Image: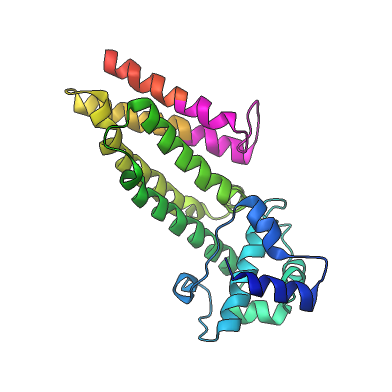
Amino acid sequence: MPPANISRRLAINHNPNYHYGYFARRCNIPMPSRSAELDLPGVTPSRQKRSRETTAALLEAGAEMLCRHSLAELSIEALCRQVGATVGAFYSRFESKDAYFNALMALAARDGERRVSEMAVAAPDDAGLAALCRQVVGGIIGWMRAHEGVLRAALQHDDNRPDSWSPFKALARANTERAIPLLLPAMGKGRRAAKSSAIAFGFQVVLGTLVNAILNDPGPLSLRDAELKERLSGCLLLLLEAEMKS
């Protein structure tokens, strides 16, 4: 996220009743704070600190707005008003609205890759299968909650741009590949291929449920319900235990 002093300056100078960081914190939206993190496709690079801060503020505000609006409903004018920037400032940074959305997707994918790489490091060596299932499912849910609006927009946008979901499909595969060596030791010896297939299918069930919750929210549990983590990790555990007994 941009430093707190940037949020205060934007709120004071441009709109005393709006603090763009408040909603991002409420939605738990991680946003870039360093210039290297703003090296994104379709984003005009800048060496000036204030310009980078405005770019980060626009990205943060857009991610928050997508929690409440579709991509088609996202107004560039309204977005700029949120952070006290001009429409010209937006287009000096982003080639188009599509380029802007691509940058948001890239940020979400990068955060997902970081979380995947940290998955194995965070797991205790003596953790049981139930604890590991809670850890991996909780990590996936945490990432999806953090980027809920962007992920929903990517899914809704998929009909017009079939490639828009590709980075997240690759991320799902990476999640599964990292989870297999993490969960296998807790499933006992032997039948590694069958157990690996069970883990992969379990992740398909988990991810499919979460994608449906983001896109359709059919209930009874929504993405932000605390019970969802326990229910889904329990489902994964039962599926893997059934494979262990086969």
Residue occupying the far top of the picture: 245
- Residue at x 39%, y 23% (from the top left corner): 237
Residue 203 at least partly seen: yes
- Res 183 → quadrant: top left
Drawn side of residue 10 relative to residue 129, left or right: right
Residue 64: percent from left, percent from top? 67, 57
Q: In this view, does 227 lie to the left or right of 74?
A: left
User: Is 216 in the magenta?
Assistant: yes
**Which residue is depicted at the point 50% across and 61% down?**
107
Q: Which x, y percent locates residue 27?
A: 64, 51
Check the image and report above or below for 164 versus 243: below
Where residue 188 sits: x, y (%)?
Answer: 22, 23
In the image, the segment drawn in magenta is 207-233
Vertical relation: 130 (above or below) 58: above
Q: Quadrant of the N terminus?
A: bottom right
Color style of the picture? rainbow
In the image as oriented, which residue stretches furthest toward the right?
A: 17
Residue extending furthest toward the left:
190
Whether residue 94 is visible: no
In-image side of 92 versus 189 (left or right): right
Position of the C terminus, as image quadrant, is: top left
| Residue at x-position 60% and y-position 82% | 51
Q: How many labels does the image show?
A: 0
At x 60%, y 40%, the residue is 214
Magenta span contains residue 62: no
Q: Which image quadrant is residue 29 in?
A: bottom right
Picture coordinates of residue 40, whole percent (x, y): 48, 71
Pick the front one: 224 or 176: 224
